[in-house]
Amino acid sequence: MGDLSIAPVFISIGILLTSLMVLWLYKREGGGKDTLFSPKIFKFKDFDFSLATIFIVLIPMSGMMFTLPVFWQSVRHYDAFETGLTFLPYSITLFLIAPSMGKLASKVSPKYIIQSGIVLSMVGLWLMHDSFTVDSTWKSAALSIGVYGAGIAMVFSQIQNYLLSTVDKKYVGEASGLNSAVRQLGSALGTTILGTVFLSIVTSTMTTNINESDILSNDIKTELIQSVQASSGFGERNNSQETELPESISSEIETLSNESILESLKDTFLIGIGVTAISLLVSFGLPKKLEEEIEG
């Protein structure tokens, strides 16, 4: 397919197949046959908004889990262990904040906790966009990653209750199963979509930076651009060619590569903020009180 990514094609096919599956389930249920799950569960609007909210929140979250390691390992040359350490602030805030939200939910509407968490995650993404440089370390990134983790913790701590309390009791098992399936789907789409966008931006940015370089010769520019376009922005010269390059040329190539990856990462953060903003809009469809609170 030339330079076009195959990812949008597979995503479109997936959406089509999912739609056909739902229609097939309606047909089987109408005929009195067993189904994987009852499509009637989607008649509960509060459940639909809850499912949509967590689905959309997971897209930028999973995208971040893909793009950040690329930055740490390609630009900062971290190994797997060091890359894992960069996510410690995220994990710690999840561990500390999520349990404490239970008590808060007894005083404040869980809907507002979820929305506050979404806003906080957007703040975290903006802090990452604003603070990341080619010289960033796990220490300098700890605050922004921790803020993002705190926001996600607030969302996850309450959304499960919404998913299970907004349907009839006979549908609770199916609601739980759909929740797991949608979480997996959101994670997969986030990695696919934002990962594809990130690599595409790296390729175009690296190509532009190479063309604008005043240090590289035209022959080297041509060779590098071909390598970059053939390997999604991460093209490398072979070892024999690399040893023949002057230090100034090698340094320029590394600088251009690092700047391209950083710029692409920042653009991905902005896209993540936009997607998260959509989840905030969707969350306004959530009820202020859970079903059991209303009945009480």
Image (cartoon, grey):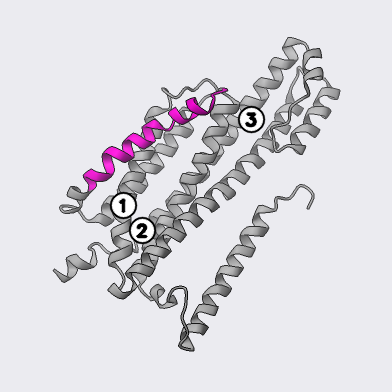
Q: Secondary structure at mark 1?
A: helix
Q: Quadrant of residue 167?
A: bottom left
**176 in magenta:** no
Task: Name the quadrant containing residue 50.
Answer: bottom left
Mark closer to the chain start, 1 or 3: 1
**Amino acid type at image mark 3:** Ser
84 drawn magenta = yes
Q: In what element is the residue under mark 2?
A: helix
Left or right: 273 as drawn, with respect to 172? right
Q: Residue at x 31, y 64 (%)?
A: 164
The stretch of residues the image draws in magenta is 77-101
Evaluate if marks 3 and 2 touch, with contact meaning CB atoms under 8 Å apart.
no
User: Residue placed at 47% from the left, 22% from the top?
Assistant: 137
Residue at the image point whose x is 67% and y is 59% from the top: 9
Magenta part mainly helix, strand or loop?
A: helix
Q: Which mark is residue 49?
A: none
Residue at the limit of the structure toward the left, as seen here: 296
Q: CB under 8 Å between callouts 1 and 2?
A: yes
Q: Check residue 114 in the rendering and tell me which mark sits there, or answer none.
A: 1
Mark 1 and mark 3: span between their CA atoms?
35 Å
Q: Which is nearer the N-term, disc 3 or disc 2?
A: 3
Query: Is 295 rendered above or below residue 235?
Result: below
For the view shown, which residue lies furthest in the bottom direction? 31
**Place of residue 155 in the rendered image (x, y in percent of width and height, measured from the top left):** 33, 50
- x then y, percent, for residue 226: 80, 34
Q: Which residue is mark 2?
A: 283
Residue under label 3, please give it. Answer: 260
Quadrant assignment for the C terminus = bottom left
Q: CA distance from mark 3 to mark 2?
A: 35 Å
Q: Position of residue 175 (x, y in %)?
A: 37, 67
